[in-house]
Amino acid sequence: MAASAPRVFFEPKIPDYEPGLYDFERFDEGVPATAAPEALDRFREDGFLMVRGLLPVEEVVAARAELEAMALSDAPDCWGIWYEGALRDHIRLDPSLDREIDGKVGGVGFAPGQEADRLPDVEPDLRARHVRKFMGFFRRHPALGQLARHPAIMALVDRLTGGSSELFQDMALVKPARGREKPWHQDHAYFNVAIDTPIVGVWIPMGEVTPENGCMHMLAGGHKEGPRLHFKRRDWQICDTDVATSGRVAVPMRPGDVLLFDGKIPHGTPTNQTDSFRWAVQYHYRPADAVLIEDAERLEAFGSEGKNVTC
Ligand SMILES: O=C(O)CCC(=O)C(=O)O
């Protein structure tokens, strides 16, 4: 059966953030792969654990090649593809058709901008230089699928979810040269999964990541505070002024390293200030018997509307 065409999302340009939003107290050094099984207490304490050299570099390189090919393809084999607002300098879009973020309905409601059923009509290379995100690809690309089910990752994830884990979301975050930030947020605010469920995010860089090109920034221990209110601002996000300045950690990584993080840890990534891509994939796992909830219950915990709060 032929794969159906991906859904295409054109994001708006988003405003700059205030300087200092991604200042940090320290770098996280991670733990060697051999020490990871004994270091899971650190995950529980900090809300994340970075494991050095957990994956063979050649497997990460092969997965990145699949993403690079998808970015250039005339028929990318994925569920959805998102383009940075900067692509609007090269294509004609009617801004009056842009929709705002709608955290109320979840899913594509989290995507601001507008949606299309075909790729932008520009040269593949120009298109590829503006990809921000792919979703829904791991079953269709062997090397990306291999990372998603990698035994070295699953051995740790299963211990953190408490048993048999189900992969329920796959995405690649491309962050092209000068690509936009992902503001501080908790991933669980995007998922209709019972609030007390142990959700584990796995973030795999496919090149060196640094504060300059947009490595992960974590609020160490912030998961213990539970759900935080999210607002419709530059994204579906925690209010910038609600992000504590103490406990902020930057997590520079190399190919082969893997970052495991709790679904309730506040985290974000700054703008890519370099002229190169910053490639990463992110997979999310939950216990196979996780209870699913409705949007209303998620918003009761994470939503800000109707709660007499400001941002
Ligand atoms: O890779 C990034 O830039 C941020 C990814 C992230 O935190 C997310 O999409 O939830």
Image (cartoon, helix red, strand yellow):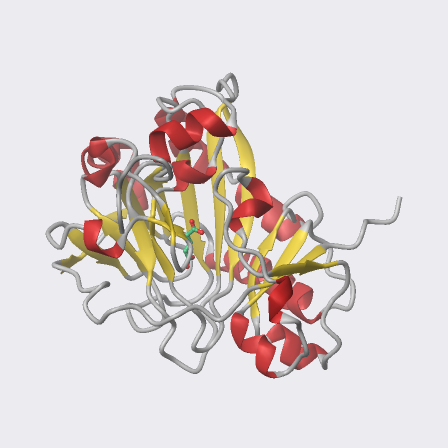
Which residue is found at the position 34% from the left and 72% from the top?
A: 16
Expressed as whole percent of the image width and height from the top left, the position of residue 230 reads 35, 44
Q: Which of the 4 quarters of the picture holds residue 253?
A: bottom left
Expressed as whole percent of the image width and height from the top left, the position of residue 1 reads 89, 44
* Left or right of 102 in this view: 309: left
Expressed as whole percent of the image width and height from the top left, the position of residue 136 reads 64, 46
Which residue is found at the position 62% from the left and 52% from the top?
A: 143
Q: Depth check: give the residue in front, 81 or 208.
A: 81
Which residue is found at the position 43% from the left and 82% from the top?
A: 275
* Left or right of 270 in this view: 165: right
Q: Is residue 74 placed above or below 189 in the rendered structure?
A: below
Which residue is found at the position 26% from the left and 42% from the top?
A: 309
Instruction: Tell me which image quadrant ligand 1 sits in.
Output: bottom left
Q: Is residue 49 placed above or below 27 in the rendered structure?
A: above
- Could one spot residue 196 in this view of the protein? yes
- Could one spot residue 149 in this view of the protein? no
Check the image and name the residue furthest to the right: 1
Q: Depth check: give the residue in front, 189 or 62.
A: 189
* Left or right of 252 in this view: 132: right
Q: Depth check: give the residue in front, 182 or 234.
A: 234
Q: Depth check: give the residue in front, 36 or 184.
A: 184
Q: Is residue 122 placed above or below 110 in the rendered structure?
A: below
